[in-house]
Image (cartoon, rainbow, N blue to C red):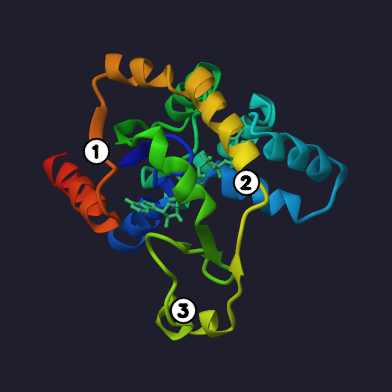
Amino acid sequence: MNVIIFGPPGAGKGTQSSFLVEKKKMFQLSTGDLLRNELKSKSKLSEKLKKIMDSGKLVSDDIINSLIEKKISDSSIKSSIIFDGFPRNIEQAKSLDTMLKKYEQKISVVINLVVDNSILVKRISGRISCSVCKKPFNEFFDPPGDPAECTTAACIDRELIKRSDDNENTVSNRLRTYEESTLPLLEYYKLKGVVKNVDAMKSINEVTSQINCIFNDL
Ligand code: AP5
C-alpha cells in the first residue's frame, strides 16, 4: 500500500512517517530529506538547491520527478511507500500518477494533517533532530530526553540539529508556497475519493492513533 502524508510545513508529516516506518515497515520517501542529502555534496546543483530551499520556494519539478522515479522503480519497496512532502503541486501529482501507472502501483490513501497556522511557527522554530537517526523532536512539545533512549545505540553520540530553513522569515514563505501551490492538490485527491482528514492539533500520540484507525479501516 502506498500512502501520501499531506499537510503544511510543521504539520507532523515527518514525525508520523517515522512511526509508520517503525510499526508498518513502510519506506519513507521524503523529498525534503532527499534534497537535504543532495546539499551535503557541495556541488553546483547543491548551491542552487540551498538558495531555493532557504527562500521557501519549490525546487523544479524536473529535479523532484527524477528523484522520485529512482525510488518508485525500486522493486524492493514496491507498494510500501509513504510519500512525505511530495507531490507539492498539480504537475507533480500528474507525474506521480504516470509513474505509478508505469510501475503498476497506486495511492491507497492521502492522510491530510489538519492544523491551524497559528501553531506551525512554534512547531517549526522548536524543531530539532537527532544527527544519527534523524528522528525529529521539539524543544516545546517533544523534548529529546536522554540520548541513550533515542533510536539506536549510536545515537549516544548524537548532536541535535536545526534546519537552516527553520527560521521565521523562511517559514512564512513556506506557508505561502503551501497555500498557493500545494493546498489546491487536496481537491485533486478528494475527487479520487482517497482523502482522510486527521486532527493534527492533537498530541503526537493522539495523531498516531487516528492514523492507525485509518489504516485498520483500509
Ligand atoms: P520539507 O522538508 O518537505 O519540509 P516541509 O514540507 O516544509 O515540512 P516540514 O519537514 O517542515 O514539516 P513536517 O510536516 O514534516 O513536520 P515535522 O514532523 O518535522 O521541504 C523543505 C524544502 O524542500 C521546501 O521548502 C522546498 O524548497 C523543498 N522541497 C521539498 N519537497 C519538494 C517537492 N516535492 N517539490 C519541490 N520542492 C520541494 O514536525 C515539526 C515539529 O513539530 C517537530 O519538532 C515535531 O516534533 C513537532 N510535532 C509534530 N507533530 C506534533 C504534534 N502533534 N504536537 C506537537 N508537536 C508536534
Numbered disc 3: secondary structure: loop
Determine which residue is flagged by label 3: 152
**Tag 1: residue type?**
Val
What amino acid is labelled 2 in the image?
Asn
Which quadrant of the figure has residue 184? top left
For the residue with label 3, is its CB less than 8 Å from the closest atom of ligand 1?
no
- Whole-percent x, y for residue 4 in the image: 38, 36
The residue positioned 53% from the left and 51% from the top of the image is 125
Residue 173, position in %: x, y? Answer: 61, 30
Q: Nearer the viewer, mark 1 or mark 2?
A: 2
Rendered location of residue 101, percent (x, y): 43, 25
Q: Is residue 97 visible?
A: yes
Q: Quadrant of the C terminus?
A: top left
Q: In front: 209, or 168?
A: 168
Precedes in sequence: disc 3 or disc 2: 3
Marks 3 and 2, Cα distance to the nearest angstrom? Answer: 29 Å
Nearer mark to the viewer, of 1 and 3? 1
Q: Which residue is label 1 attached to? A: 198
